[in-house]
Each structure stands twice: as C-alpha cells, then as structure tokens.
C-alpha cells in the first residue's frame, strides 16, 4: 500500500522533528520498486518539506537496494501481441495505473510506437487502454473473471507474482509479453528513509546496508539459505509454502490452464557489487537507477501532467538519491562478495525474439556520422532506454535519404549506426559490450516517406533500434 508507506514515513519524520532520536510511530524505512519512486517522492516529499519550511532536512531519500524484480513484474497479453506488438492496439488491460507493472507496458508500447490512452473511462482502437485496478491481485482477478465493459473485454493484465500465477492457473490464455526479465534494470527494490535520521545515524545505517549485502551473498551462495528465506516468506505473506515461493523466486516456465507455456516469477537479491553497478559507482557503469527514475518519471508526467506539476512535480534525482551510504557500507565489509549479476551476450548467432522496433530520428551533421547538438541530446535518451532493457540485444539498422549515390548512402548508413554504438560504449562500456550489438546498413533502400520533400527525406534519415532476447 503506497499511501500507507508514505504515511509511515511522515509519522516517523514528525517524531524526529519533535526531538525524538528514534521513531515509535510509522517506519524509518520503506522499500519500493525504483521505477515508481518518482511518483512516490512527488507525493511524500512535499508533505515532509512542510516540517521545516522546505529546508529539506526531513525529506525521503534512496540509500541503497536489496534486490531486483527479474521477471515477476510483467505485461501479460494474448500470444499474438508477442508475435505482432501492433495487435495490441485497442487492447484493454487491467492494472494499477502509474505503478511499476504499468510502467513496463508503457515502455513496451513506446518502444513499439503504440500510443497509450490515459483515460480509463474511454476506449481508443489505436491505443493501449486501461481498467484501473486497486492492486495487482485485483488486476489478475479482473482478467480471470472475463470482465466485459462497454468498451471491450479485458484481454490483458499487468501484475506481479503471485498475480501472474493466479492468471495462469485461474483462467490462462495469456503469455508474458515483456517483463522485468527483459527490462532487467527497471525494477530495483530501493530502500527509502528520512534524510535527517540517516545523517544522524550514519554508522548504524551503513552497518544495516553492510548486513543486507552480506545476507544477499549468503542467499546467492547457499541453496539452504535461499530455501529458508522462502519458508520465511510464506509465513510473512501467510500464503502457500516455502517451495512455492522458492520456485517463483527463481522463475519458471509452466503450462497455464489452457496449455500455453508461460513464464512466471523471477527475482534477485542485491549484494554490494550489485549496488555499485546499479548506482553507477563502478568504473564504466551507467547509473541505472538514475535512468529508470528519469525515464518513468517522465512517462508519468507526460501521461498525467495535472498530477505531477508545481509542488507535486517529480523531483530531480539528485535530491532524492544519496549513494554515500553504499560507499560507507563497502568500507565495513572484509570482502566485496560475489560479482554483480550482469547479462551475458553472444557475439554471434540468433538474438532471439523481437521485443520492440522503434525508429529514432537522430540528427547527424550533413553527410557525416557525427551528431549535431540535438542528436547528442537524443543519444542520452536512447542510452537510458537501452540501459533499462539491459537483458536485450540491440540491433542498429542505419537508413538514409536518397541524396547522393547508393554506395555512398550504404556506407553512411553503416557509419551512423556504428556511431550510435560507439557513443553508447564511450558513455557506459559496462552496459554496452560489443557482443550486445548487431549492425546493419540499408542506405536509401527502405524509405518511410517520399524523398521528394524535405520532410520526407528527414524522416528517412534514421536509425532503427530493434530490441530482442532469448526466452
């Protein structure tokens, strides 16, 4: 319950403001998925700033991460959506609007150039449409009930485990279209606490993080520890048993009620090295938290501008992120632990199922493979988008207009596609190894518009980015 977590932080901050050393009400810390943290901070920090006339000593901040969703959060839809994303136009999806699972659908739709209908009271045949559910379990129940509205029968759902399991076992018929398995950097489970408390108890906070990182290493290294954690989860959730939670923590493929093979579950724990990688504290690593916070904060603002403006606008990431506690925790550990969990790519062979295709209009200097200032700005947007989809191969298809010779255009198209790859590798080599890329040049052979007009030629000068991955 997001609102309850916000209220708990506010209750704790009020006691700290009144002179308490420790909180007897509310909570010192809450954990939420990082892609939804922008909306969370937009709601809670304006309330916390009222305690000290906007000085900001009692605001909530991210100080670290305990793990990732790596498959359990997903968009589920009919199999034809997976083979042809454009078939999702007119689809009606049940989910919690502006939540992390909704974010997955938003990114997938944008990457496939499918528009979103933010008004859950209307239906647009050319967009992805929504039924707003109060929680992720109810979203699954809406689909399982075969709900029919004036607009259309619900034929999709965004949810997370055990919601995906409930869909598969309760009604079936849907597959995982895209999930946090493919968008592996989208959903870090971040620790959020009150700035004042963290500063006043720095050693204890860093010790807490160090203990969390050591525990993650134990879970990674010892199956019995993971099995014990799953049994504890069953007691905490008061649902199922340890074997159930262990299976879906690890992620699995099984047949649903209709016989479809569907991916279910998938999570991970974060140790010290995972945190260093997440927050861009390792050499050559992108700050993936900044990317996911920024991308999904922008999506929420674009789709619901009236909700995120003025005092309630999504704050800059610099205000809500303090990585000094992760670095402090690292000095408390006698060893750094297991290597960070990173995606692996093969430099040859099949790149798997296509997840999305998107044409990016990147401005280059005329007749060259160098970026204009606007093109450079676009590249930062592309970097964030591809960093979030960290488990997917990146195919770069270069295209030109028909100005010049065919041979010259083929060469220029290839050099421009290579320029995109090279720029990404300079900015974040850890996120963009050579083996992740495939490059193709098409020159002027596949125009999107007529080359007879200035506008048409501009549209044809593009780099198509295809994201794909193996099941």
Image: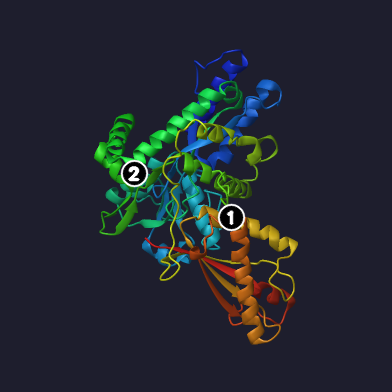
Classed neighbour count for the residue bearing mark 2: other residues with Cα under 10 Å, few (<14), some (14–19), many (≥20):
many
Q: Residue 249 carries which label?
A: 2
- Locate residue 312, reporting x and y percent: 65, 36
- Locate residue 437, reporting x and y percent: 51, 66
Compare residues 53 and 109 and report the one nearer the observer.
53
Residue wearing tag 1: 428
For the point 65% across and 30% down, the residue is: 46
For the point 70% across and 63% down, the residue is: 375
Of badges 2 and 1, the one in the foreground is: 1
For the point 55% across and 46% down, the residue is: 282
Name which quarter of the figure residue 270 lies in: top left
Of label 2 and label 1, which has the lower sequence position?
Answer: 2
Question: Above or below — where is 241 with respect to 180?
Answer: above
Compare residues 320 and 212 and report the one nearer the observer.
212
Tell me whether the residue at label 2 lies in contact with that at label 1, contact meaning CB atoms closer than 8 angstroms.
Answer: no
Q: Is residue 55 left or right of residue 152?
A: right
Question: Above or below — where is 116 with respect to 435?
Answer: above
Q: Is residue 78 left or right of residue 430?
A: left
- Locate residue 191, reporting x and y percent: 50, 34
Compare residues 332 and 364 and report the one nearer the observer.
332
In this orientation, does residue 181 appear? yes
């Amino acid at each position: 319950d997001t609102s309850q977590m916000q209220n708990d932080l506010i209750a704790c901050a009020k006691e700290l403001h009144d002179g308490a050393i420790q909180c007897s009400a509310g909570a010192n810390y809450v954990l939420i998925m990082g892609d939804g943290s922008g909306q969370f901070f937009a709601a809670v920090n304006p309330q916390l700033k009222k305690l000290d006339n906007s000085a900001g000593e009692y605001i909530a901040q991210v100080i670290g991460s305990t793990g990732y969703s790596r498959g359990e959060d997903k968009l589920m839809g009919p199999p034809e959506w997976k083979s042809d994303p454009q078939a999702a136009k007119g689809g009606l999806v049940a989910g919690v609007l502006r939540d992390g699972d909704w974010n997955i659908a938003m990114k997938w739709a944008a990457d496939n150039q499918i528009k979103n209908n933010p008004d859950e009271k209307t239906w647009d045949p050319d967009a992805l449409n929504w039924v707003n559910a109060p929680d992720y379990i109810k979203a699954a129940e809406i689909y399982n009930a075969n709900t029919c509205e004036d607009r259309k029968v619900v034929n999709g759902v965004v949810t997370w485990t055990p919601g995906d399991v409930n869909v598969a076992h309760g009604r079936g018929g849907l597959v995982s279209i895209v999930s946090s398995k493919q968008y592996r950097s989208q959903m870090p489970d971040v620790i959020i606490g009150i700035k004042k408390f963290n500063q006043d108890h720095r050693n204890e906070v860093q010790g807490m993080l160090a203990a969390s990182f050591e525990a993650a290493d134990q879970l990674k290294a010892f199956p019995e520890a993971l099995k014990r954690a799953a049994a504890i989860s069953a007691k905490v959730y008061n649902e199922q048993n340890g074997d159930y939670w262990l299976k879906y923590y690890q992620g699995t493929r099984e047949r649903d009620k209709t016989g479809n093979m569907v991916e279910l579950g998938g999570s991970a724990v974060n140790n010290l090295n995972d945190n260093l990688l997440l927050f861009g504290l390792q050499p050559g690593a992108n700050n993936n938290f900044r990317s996911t916070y920024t991308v999904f904060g922008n999506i929420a603002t674009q789709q619901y501008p009236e909700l995120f403006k003025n005092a309630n606008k999504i704050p800059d990431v610099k205000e809500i992120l303090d990585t000094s506690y992760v670095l402090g925790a690292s000095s408390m550990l006698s060893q750094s632990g297991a290597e960070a969990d990173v995606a692996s790519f093969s430099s040859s062979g099949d790149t798997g199922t296509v997840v999305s295709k998107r044409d990016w209009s990147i401005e280059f200097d005329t007749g060259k493979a160098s970026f204009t200032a606007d093109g450079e700005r676009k590249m930062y947007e592309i970097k964030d988008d591809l960093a979030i989809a960290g488990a997917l191969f990146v195919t770069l298809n270069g295209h030109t207009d028909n100005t010049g010779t065919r041979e010259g255009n083929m060469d220029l198209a290839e050099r421009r596609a290579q320029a995109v790859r090279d720029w990404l590798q300079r900015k974040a080599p850890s996120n963009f190894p050579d083996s992740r890329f495939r490059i193709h040049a098409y020159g002027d052979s596949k125009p999107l518009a007529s080359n007879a007009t200035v506008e048409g030629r501009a549209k044809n000068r593009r780099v198509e980015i295809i994201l794909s991955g193996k099941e």
